Amino acid sequence: MTDNNPDAVLQTIQIGEARQIDPLTISKMVSFLLTDITVQASNKEDLKKLVNAVGDASSRLVENRSFSGTSF
């Protein structure tokens, strides 16, 4: 689960700054990494359903899995 706690967000931004990565890019890097981990885990367990909050990672997650439909 991601954490929007102000301290966690600040820490992520500081890590990015130390590596000369802007806040938006570091945020997307974290999001993509979490998505990749989720895809690997769901493939390993052959999940048929997955609850996913809407966000940057949602479309990437669906693209990397063969879900037959979307429920809301």
Image (cartoon, rainbow, N blue to C red):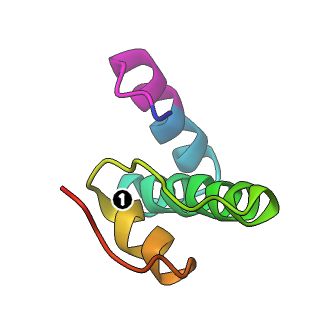
Near-viewer residue (59 or 50): 50
Residue 12 % position (x, y): 52, 37
The answer to which quarter of the image holds residue 62 is bottom left
Which residue corresponds to the image point at 55% horizontal and 52% vertical from the top-left? 30
Check disc 1 and give the amino acid type: Leu
Magenta range: 3-11
Residue 15 % position (x, y): 60, 40
Task: Identify the residue position indicated by label 1 in the image.
Answer: 24
Which residue corresponds to the image point at 63% horizontal and 55% vertical from the top-left? 38
Toward the right, the furthest residue is 44
Residue 32 % position (x, y): 55, 63
Q: Is residue 36 above or below residue 12?
A: below
The answer to which quarter of the image holds residue 25 is bottom left
Residue 13 % position (x, y): 46, 40
Q: Is residue 29 left or right of residue 19?
A: left
Q: Is residue 25 above or below residue 9?
A: below
Q: Which quadrant would the C terminus be assigned to in this image? A: bottom left
